[in-house]
Image (cartoon, helix red, strand yellow):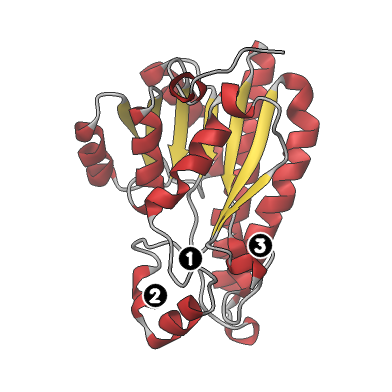
Amino acid sequence: MAQVTPAQRLFDLSGEVALVTGASSGLGRRFAQVLAAHGAKVVAAARRSERLAALAEEHPAILPLVLDVTDTASFPAALEEAERLAGSLSLLLNNAGIASGRRILDTPEEEWRAVQQANVDSVWHLSRAFAARLAGAKRPGAIINIASLVAERVGVSSAAYAVSKAAVLHMTKAQALEWARHGIRVNAICPGYIHSEMTDAYLASPAGQEMIRRIPQRRAGDPSDLDGALLLLAAPRASGFMTGASVFVDGGHSLA
């Protein structure tokens, strides 16, 4: 039986090089900060260059990369630039995405397409390019996909978003099954309602307050509530035998 590994080493990400999408704000920004704080080099990717620059100023291990995840043709060049900046990538965190808030009959075609393009197509194509790069070089690595509570629990007025996140959840399993032979682990985090720029207005509304009362813990999450799940899935020592898993961090909402 292996010796007990102290937590400091179990979650030590020294030597890991991560690419985090949607890193200019919200959860993506927090993810980049947490990974860097635990020893990883982080390439923070997003469209808003000024926000990326401000994030990079906070930590010498965070490097900015302007990337639009809806431009899938740019992914090979983006991965090349990320490795030029930080070294050989070992972790991809697919966080970028957009929300929608309409009922199905009220959702315009262009909104449906935009949500699927940003939330599903980007994960498919960037993960594929990343995995091909690692497999070609015979390097192990990990992918963490950010899904959602609503991947399994649909709410009214969020159908397009829920469908996209359900696709991400199933995609995670398919990727994990196919790429395990290459030493690439693929897992998902499914957050519940977490305070962020995207959710704060809703959470403060009467509808949001009513929803919070239905969460068993009677609160929305803080971005820091996701730190443990992130580190678990990112650290090879901590989750080396985990792939295809989905970690729900939702205050018990999926149980209610």
Q: Residue 27's x, y, as percent?
A: 40, 51
Name the mark nearer the viewer: 3 or 2: 2
Question: Label 2 amino acid?
Answer: Leu
Say whether marks 1 and 3 touch (CB < 8 Å). no
Asked if marks 3 and 2 touch (Cβ < 8 Å), the reply is no
Looking at the rendered structure, the kind of residue marked 3 is: Ala
Instruction: Look at the image and tell me whether residue 135 can be seen.
Output: yes
Marks 2 and 1, the one that precedes in the sequence: 1
Lower sequence index among marks 3 and 2? 3
Which class describes the residues within 10 Å of circle 2: few (<14), some (14-19), or many (20+)? Answer: many
From what the image shows, is residue 224 above or below residue 87? below
C-alpha gap between disc 3 and disc 2: 19 Å
**In the rendered image, the vertical position of residue 76 relative to residue 116, given as above or below:** above
Image location of residue 213, percent across then percent down: 48, 80
Q: Residue at x 43, y 25 (%)?
A: 82
Disc 3 target residue: 151
Q: Mark 1 highlights which residue? A: 193
Q: Are marks 2 and 1 in contact (CB under 8 Å)?
A: yes
Q: Secondary structure at mark 1?
A: loop
